[in-house]
Amino acid sequence: MNNVLANTVKGTSSFVNGSSKADRKKYGQFFTAQSSAKFMASLFSIPAKDSIRILDAGAGSGILSVALVERLRNEGFSGAIRLVCYETDSSIIPLLKSNLDELASACNIEYELRAENYILSQPFSAAGLFDGEGEYDLVIGNPPYKKIPKDTKECRHMSDVCYGAPNLYFLFMSMGISNLKQEGELVYIIPRSWTSGAYFARFRQYLLSLCVITDIHLFESRDKVFDGESVLQETMIIKVKKSQRRPQRINVTYTATSDFSDIRSFSSDYDTIVRPNGYICLVTSPSEADTLQRINRFPSSLPLDGLPMKTGVIVDFRTKEVLRDEGNEANSYPLFYSHHIRDGKVQWPIGAENEFICTTHLGYLQENTYYLFVKRFTSKEENRRLQCGIYIPNDSYKYISTQNKVNYIRCSSAEEAYGLYVLLNSTLYDNYYRILNGSTQVNSTEVNSMPVPTRDVISRMGSELMGKDLSVSNCNEIINKWIK
C-alpha cells in the first residue's frame, strides 16, 4: 500500500523537474515533501465512524491525500472513505487523476476531482450564514502561497476575512474551516505570517471563533520544508479542531531537518500561545513559553501607558524635494535614519547624506523632545531583533523628523526614554518579540501589543540605568528586579 505514496512522490518530482518555477509561481505552487506529508497525516485523530469524508483543496499531485488515506488504512480504518480534491492547474491534473486512480484501487476509496476554483465554488460568510454543519470530517492542505490584489474576485467573495494585501493561503484555510463538520479536524502547512499583525486580524478572529488549535509544528529553516524550492517565508504546520471545547494545552513540535529525525516536542498552556488579543505566539521550547508567561502577566501596553510606538513618515523617494545634506536654510530640521542609532544612543549628525529636512509641512515634522528610536529592519543573522537608541533633545531645533525605517516612542522625560530602552534592549523582550514575529521587520503594531509594566515602573527602571553603561547585561539586571 505504501507504494502509492512513493509513486506519487516520484511522479511529482518528474513534474517539478519538467516545469519552470515561473509556471509554478503563477499558481503559488510549492509541493509538499514526503516527510512533511506523512507527518501532517499523522496529526489527525481517526474518527470512530463508519465513513469519513476528506477534503484536499489545491491538491496538486495528491501527495497529502495519498499520505492521509494510506495512514487511515494502515492503522485499521475499514470504513468508507470519500475524498474530494480541488485543482485548477490543467498541467498537473492528469498526474493528479492518475495518482488518485491508483489510490482508489489500492485503498478502496471513492474520490471526486473538481477542476474548479475552490474559493469561488461556494458561498462564504464569517458570520456563519452559510456554514451549516459542514461536509468534511478531515481537511488537509498545502494551499497556494500568493499575494493577490484586494479587488480580485476571491477577495471580494471572502471580504469578511480580508484586510490590506491578502494572500490566497488564508482564504483557502478560512474556506476549509467553513467546510469542516463540527468536531472535524484541519491540518494545513502555511506561512507563519498570519499569527500576528493587522492584515490577518479578521482571519484570526474567524479561526478562533469556530476552532481551537491543538497542534503546531515549526521548522528551524525555510529550506527544509519544500524539496528543491526557494521559500522566502517562515512556514509552519497547524492542526485545528472545529470545537468550542478549548484544550488546556497545545502540542508543539520543532525540527531542524527535512526528514523529521530530530523532532522535539513539548506542550504549552493554551493561553500562553493563544493570546487574548488574538495573536498566536509560536514557541519552540519550554524556556520560550516561560518568557511569554513572565511578560504576559503585565496588564498594560505601550498605548495604554500613553507611550505608543509609531513609524517615521518620511519616505525618501516620495519626499526628495525636502531632503537636504546641510541645514543652512530656514525651516531646516534634523532627519533621523536607522544608521543614526548607534550603541544605544542616537548620534547625529554623522556626515551622511540627507540628514536634514527643509519644510513647513507639519505632517513631516514632530516635536523635538525625548524619544526612543527603534530600527524597523534588521538582518536574519543579527543577534538582536530590537535595536534601540535613546534620543535626548537639544535646544537648537523646534522640530525633528524621522525616516520611514525608524520606529519611535515619544517620551515625557529622560527617565521614560531610558526605561523603555531597558525594556526593549533586554534579552527578555527581544526574545518575546522574536516569538511574536518570525520576520526581520519590527512592526509597531506588534510592539504595541506586547504587555509592559506601568509608566511609573518604566520611569523607575530608567532612573536605575541613567549614568550606567547601556549594555544588554545592565538592562537584564534591572529588568530582572521588576519581572520575576
Image: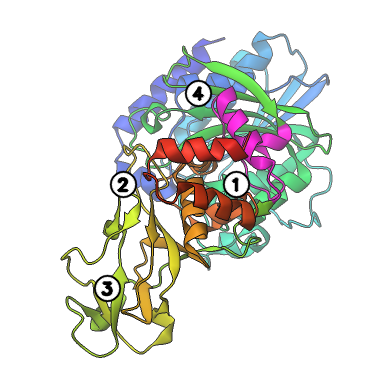
What is the C-alpha distance between the residues marked 2 and 4?
24 Å
Residue pictured at 33% horizontal, 37% vertical: 230
Give above or below for 236 relative to 414: above
Question: Is residue 116 visible in this depiction of the protein?
Answer: no
Mark 3 touches mark 1? (CB < 8 Å): no
Mark 2 lies on residue: 22
Is 342 a magenta residue?
no
Mark 1 lies on residue: 172
Question: What is the crowding at mark 4: few (fewer than 14 residues within 10 Å), some, or many (at least 20)?
Answer: many
Residue type beneath disc 1:
Phe
Is 292 a magenta residue?
yes
Quarter assignment of residue 86: top right
Residue at disc 3, secondary structure? helix
Question: What is the crowding at mark 3: few (fewer than 14 residues within 10 Å), some, or many (at least 20)?
Answer: few
Q: Give the quadrant of the N terminus.
A: top right
What is the C-alpha distance between the residues marked 3 and 1?
36 Å
The one nearer the camera, 297 or 440, is 297
Mark 3 or 1: the one toward you: 3
What is the C-alpha distance between the residues marked 1 and 2?
22 Å
Give above or below for 252 relative to 352: above
Mark 1 or 2: the one toward you: 1
Quarter assignment of residue 195: top right
Q: Position of residue 216 (x, y in %)?
A: 60, 29
Upstream in sequence: badge 3 or badge 2: 2
Mark 4 touches mark 1? (CB < 8 Å): no
Mark 2 or 4: the one toward you: 4
What is the C-alpha distance between the residues marked 4 and 1?
19 Å
Residue at disc 4, secondary structure? helix
Mark 3 lies on residue: 317
What is the C-alpha distance between the residues marked 3 and 2?
30 Å
Residue type beneath disc 2:
Ala
